[in-house]
Each structure stands twice: as C-alpha cells, then as structure tokens.
Amino acid sequence: MNEEKQMFKEKIRQLRDAVSTREELSEYADFLAEGYQKGFFEEQPVSEYVGGVAGVVHGLEGFYKNQSLEMPEKPTWNMMARILTAAFFHS
C-alpha cells in the first residue's frame, strides 16, 4: 500500500471518529468523495454502494459489536459517517 493511501486511511479514522455535527458529516462526506476520486476505494457503481449502505444498516448491531463499540439508541451523525465509510467495503 502506498504511503498516500495509508495516510488517507489514517485520516479517515480520525475524521470519522470526530464527526458529531451535520457540518462535520458534510465535510467528511466530501473527504470520502475526494478519496474515491483519487482511487483510494475500489471503483463501483452507485447501485453497489447504495446496496452496501443497505447491508451495513441491516446488520448495524453486529457492525457495532464487531468494532467493540456501543450502538447508540438513536441515530447520530457519527453513526452515519461510519455507515458511509463501511459501505465502500460492504458492497
């Protein structure tokens, strides 16, 4: 893995974990889009990505458990950031 891609992955974790507002989620989504355009994620049709979002949401309790995180009772901006990120790998 090249150094730029590794730095991108580390930045994803930092930014994702910090998302707590709508504005931060918007900035984070822009960051993900930029990474996709740079080729840091596998190219995929939108339908596959949306299917990945659906898959993550469907298995959300297991998703949180596998990451040793407590699932919030109500949706949060951070939860959405995690779903958007995981969908790249779940599709």
Image: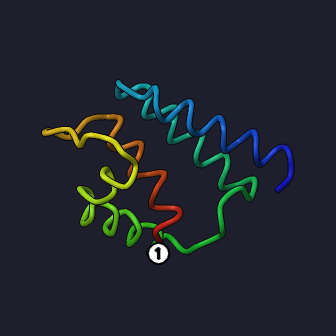
**Between 66 and 2, the one nearer to me in the picture:** 66
Picture residue at 86% right of the left edge, 52% below the top:
2
Quadrant location of residue 71? Answer: top left
| Amino acid residing under circle 1 | Glu
Image location of residue 63, percent across then percent down: 33, 57
Check disc 1 and report the residue beneath it: 48
Is 37 positioned to the left or the right of 68 in the image? right
| Relative to 60, residue 91 above or below | below
Picture residue at 59% right of the left edge, 39% below the top:
12
- How many numbered circles does the render carry? 1
Q: Residues within 10 Å of mark 1 (few under 14, many from 20)?
A: some
Image location of residue 80, percent across then percent down: 34, 44
Image location of residue 11, percent across then percent down: 64, 34
Which color scheme does this rendered protein use? rainbow
Picture residue at 26% right of the left edge, 35% below the top:
76
| Relative to 60, residue 34 above or below | above
Is 88 positioned to the left or the right of 23 in the image? right
Image location of residue 37, percent across then percent down: 70, 55
Quadrant location of residue 47? Answer: bottom left
Give SS at disc 1: helix
Is 50 positioned to the left or the right of 44 in the image? left
Picture residue at 56% right of the left edge, 30% below the top:
14
